[in-house]
Amino acid sequence: MTGGVQLSVAVEQGSTIHINTSSSINALNACKVCVKLRNLQSCQTQVVLKQDALLDFSCSQPEKVFFVQIIRVIATSNIDPKEHDSFVKFNRTFIWILKSTATRSLQLNFSSTGLKQIQPPETCPDKHTYKIMVENVSVALARILVALPDKSSSQDFLTPYFIPENAEVLWSFNIPSTYYTDVHILSYTLPKCLQSESIPRMKYTWQGANPVVKGMNEMQPSVEPGNFYLSIKNCKMSFPHSPSQSLRVHFQISAMKRRRGQCEGDLPDKQVLEINVKKKDPKSVCVLQQDSLITDTVTIASGKHFVLNTFDCNKDELELTVNQTIECKDWKNCATTAFPLTFQYEQQCIPGVLKTLTWLIHGPLNSAVHLESPLDGLRYCLPGDKCVFMLTLAHANTPSFTLGQFCPRGSFQKIQIRESNIVISASLSSFSEQSMGDKAFLTYSFTKEISENYIFSVAPKSDSPTNLATPGWPNAVTSSSTVSWIVDMEPQSTSTLTFSNISQPICKGEHPKITVQTVESQEMLLSSKTGDKLKDLLVHESFYINMTNCKLPTGAFRAKMEITVHSSSHKLLMGIILGVMGLVLVAVTAVVILIVIRGISSPSPPGVSMALCTL
């Protein structure tokens, strides 16, 4: 053949070679292959060879027109794609037909490098793609052994293109030590099953543990260590069904080497504790796991055994919120006794930075709570102020109404609340250790009911002004509420009381009241009515501030005040100034009298008349 190519082909025993033209090539214009056997030659666009032959192609580049399939029938032997030098330039497909008896299973072992499953129309980087097909047999179980590499990896897996009814596919995953796996379902198609309870699911089995079954639409296991089996079983399907309704699952297995921490223990019943561990950033690589459940928040409660696992978590990535309930229902056990308000952090292995401590205090019926600070008093914190830790007081029955926020080291010595159930929260903003939980932020005690709703005992200091505000500021005081401040002044000191912000409602009947009265002399310095403009008061001794809201107010009743203390040296200086001013006044008066006397003895100037009477 002029311009053609001639190839000599040797066919192994048990092999068959198919040479076909590509479907994309026009067969009428394509070149042909001629086979010469025993001096007989036949030319066509496809040929099947079962023995050695001499091939003549009618074109100079037959590899662009034809593709080659090399088929072998084997029983048990190594599968090795033996090359034919004649077809090196052709696209080649090697097909091995594996024969086994009906009572025996078939096992395929791949080389140490293994294979990676791909989804059509994907291709392999080296252009070598392997396909496993099963025809005309009943598959009871297909088992696929997967060994993940000793490095972080993510690999995709797919169920066979068609799974017969009641057939099961099982993957056996071999995971390197210290690695943890995550399973994600990327897509799936479920068949129409005759029975709803037989709908295919993902079944996971770890050694020494009960199987875990997950629906296709559920969250799959995450951060699981060790080797495991994954199986999917098809159901008895309703007929007729199309291939598009067949069972099809595309999932991904990710393995990552992780740093693990574990905390296991029990919180004592007597403390009635609840500890919440929360990730600051849900997008961080830190993983929280409790009872094989991956979550961003873990709750640990008293009386329950817990096992908390963390993976790749730094301490500052987690924050702790602690709730503790304290009850004292019997007067003989809690009356007039001061208890320190602390959090005994016994489970030191729980990771995280302590952020908020909340105590829910329940006292005897019809009791009042007394709070005192052993840490140099408390400072009232106006909205927007910040401090290292902040105490927030609220009623247990109406936690949305905050009585006030307080910072450490201030003038407030005692707080009395006519309520047996209160909530105290300590918000911590700059702690790196749990040690602050052991310190007593407050002491609390219970007494019989008090006459006012709230009583604040304050000892103002001269180094800075003391802020006061009605409970709930800037919100209004509740109707019929009474608030008192007992201001304890040092001897020989004075103070200025400034009403910086006052809002008084309009009431029917009785009006809201604001009074200021000294303690020792019982002098009433202020008794205000609605609409009165309140001026600054200069007070020379300890005093009371009393406020009462009316029953049916129209508008808000609230007040913000400031106390500025003047020391005894300031009072002495004022006395000296007043004394000097008195002397100056006496001197001026004497001079005036002298001028008048001299004026009487002098002659009157012309044109001026003056009438005088003797005394």
Image: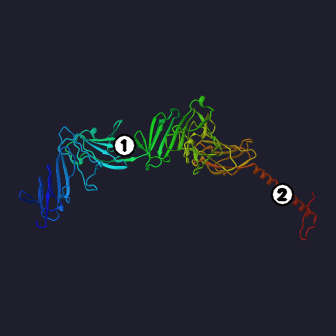
Mark 2: which secondary structure? Answer: helix
**Residue with the mark numbered 2:** 584
For the residue pair 601 and 66, the one nearer the viewer reads as: 66
Q: Residue at x 89, y 69 (%)?
A: 608
Q: Depth check: 561 or 404 in front?
A: 404
Give the image location of residue 544, x and y in percent.
68, 43
Sequence-wise, which precedes: disc 2 or disc 1?
Answer: 1
Asked if 140 appears above or below 503 in the picture, the reply is above
Residue 280 visible to an observer of this rendering: yes
Kindly identify which numbered label has been placed on residue 221. 1
In the picture, residue 8 is in which quadrant?
A: bottom left
367 or 276, which lies in front?
Answer: 276
Horizontal and vertical percent position of residue 307: 44, 38
- Percent x, y of residue 296: 44, 45
Using a 10 Å C-alpha cutoff, classify the residue at mark 1 as few (fewer than 14 neighbours), some (14 to 19) or many (20 or more): some
> With respect to residue 524, does 5 lie above or below?
below
Q: Amino acid at mark 1?
A: Pro
Mark 2 or 1, closer to the camera: 1
Which image quadrant is residue 233 in? top left
Nearer-the-camera pick, 496 or 206:
206
- Please provide percent x and percent y for residue 396: 54, 39
* Quarter of the figure that contains the C terminus: bottom right
* Residue 96, label in figure: none
